[in-house]
Image: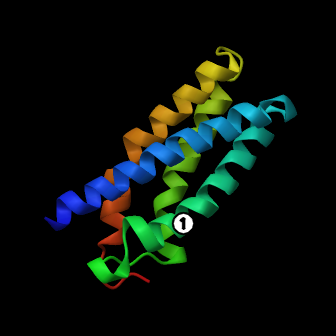
Amino acid sequence: MRRHSAWIRFCLSGVFFTTLGPSLLWLSYPLGAFVAVGISEILAHSLRFVSFRWFVFPASKGYKVTAIRYILSAVPISLANLLAVALLRNQLDRTTLSFSVALISVSMGFLWSRFVYTLPKFH
């Protein structure tokens, strides 16, 4: 049951952050592609950390969400999003680029986060 519960919490969080991050990217895109990805990543990940710590992977369920673990879980996703923006910003319109970033985040998110938050002896 624990696995299903974590999956449901992650999916609910994923729906919210999969909408929030690309929306922030789309809204801030007129400031420039790299500024937009910076704004969306910083704001979305700040809120996502709080969500992961208290809702998605709570300590009461045996997970260990710390700032270091969160950074470890977020960096690959953020780097992939930055790389996607760098490679695709001149080929895709901002809406398609925002959807592409959302797909990257979703495809990497759950498995990597689940692995990072269940690592023993890693602060």
Q: Is residue 29 above or below residue 13?
A: above
Q: Amino acid at mark 1?
A: Phe
Q: Residue furthest left?
A: 1
Horizontally, residue 34 falls left or right of residue 10, namely right
Q: Quadrant of the N terminus?
A: bottom left
Q: Is residue 67 above or below residue 26?
A: below
Residue 71 appears in the rendering: no
Toward which corner of the image does residue 23 lie, by quadrant? top right
Comparing 120 with 19, the one in front is 19
Q: Is residue 20 above or below residue 65?
A: above
Q: In the image, residue 57 lies at what x, y percent?
A: 36, 69
Horizontally, residue 35 falls left or right of residue 101, namely right
Horizontally, residue 2 falls left or right of residue 78, namely left
Category of crowding for the residue at label 1, using alpha-carbon neighbours closer than 10 angstroms: few (below 14), some (14–19), many (at least 20):
some
Q: In the image, residue 56 lies at what x, y percent?
A: 39, 64
Q: In the image, residue 15 lies at what x, y percent?
A: 45, 43
Toward which corner of the image does residue 87 lie, by quadrant? top right
Q: Residue furthest right?
A: 31
Q: Quadrant of the C terminus?
A: bottom left
| Residue at (60, 43) in percent of width and height | 21
Comparing 85 with 58, the one in front is 58
Q: Which residue is mark 1?
A: 49
| Residue at (69, 23) in percent of width and height | 89
Q: In the image, residue 81 lies at what x, y percent?
A: 58, 40
Q: What colouring does the structure picture have?
A: rainbow
| Residue at (54, 66) in percent of width and height | 49
Disc 1 is placed on an element classified as helix
| Residue at (59, 19) in percent of width and height | 96
